[in-house]
Amino acid sequence: MIFLRRPSGKRMDRALGYLGLAARAGRLIVGAEDCARQPRRHGWLLVAAADAADNTLAQARALAREHGQALYITDYRKAELAKAVGRSSPVAVLMVCDEGLAATFMRAAGRDRGEQEERV
């Protein structure tokens, strides 16, 4: 599934806060290559930056398809995602590895898994 629309305002800022919380809890994997190395059932949600390279997005789509995960493409740029998770280098792809944090992120982002979903 791919979620494409970005809600505006405080709800999305709160969603970024949940990504930071997942990073501090050790329940976030950063980078497409690191996400690909994880066991099949390890992650719950892939999050991609709007300015991620086409090749990176294709890799994230393939990973989501292979692992049966949702892929959420935000309107946030790589630098904004990096800042949210406490990284100094740009971040194109993240994997949330906790079901509750993934659901909370999606709720905060104004998403329901049945809304605007598209099979990858």
Image (spheres, helix red, strand yellow):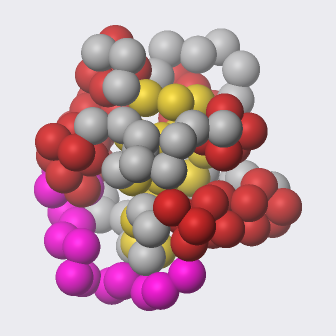
Residue 116 image point, x, y percent = 33, 85
Report the number of numbered marks: 0
Residue 36 image point, x, y percent = 66, 45
- Residue 32 relative to residue 98: left or right: right
The residues colored magenta run 107-120
Judge whether residue 108 is colored magenta: yes
Look at the picture and state if 4 lies above or below 74. below
Main SS, magenta region, reads loop
Q: Say whether residue 60 is visible.
A: yes
Of residues 63 and 118, the one drawn nearer to the viewer in this rendering:
63
| Quadrant (top left, top right, bottom left, bottom right) of the C terminus | bottom right
Residue 75 image point, x, y percent = 51, 58
Q: Residue at x 65, y 14 (%)?
A: 88
Q: Residue at x 43, y 63 (%)?
A: 69
Judge whether residue 49 is colored magenta: no
| Quadrant (top left, top right, bottom left, bottom right) of the N terminus | bottom left
- Residue 111 relative to residue 32: left or right: left
- Residue 23 relative to residue 53: left or right: left
Query: In the figure, residue 101 lies in which quadrant?
Result: top left
Q: Residue at x 36, y 83 (%)?
A: 117
Query: In the figure, residue 64 lies in which quadrant?
Result: bottom right
Of residues 103 and 3, the one drawn nearer to the viewer in this rendering:
103
Residue 19 image point, x, y percent = 35, 32
Q: Residue at x 56, y 52 (%)?
A: 48
Look at the picture and state if 29 lies above or below 40. above
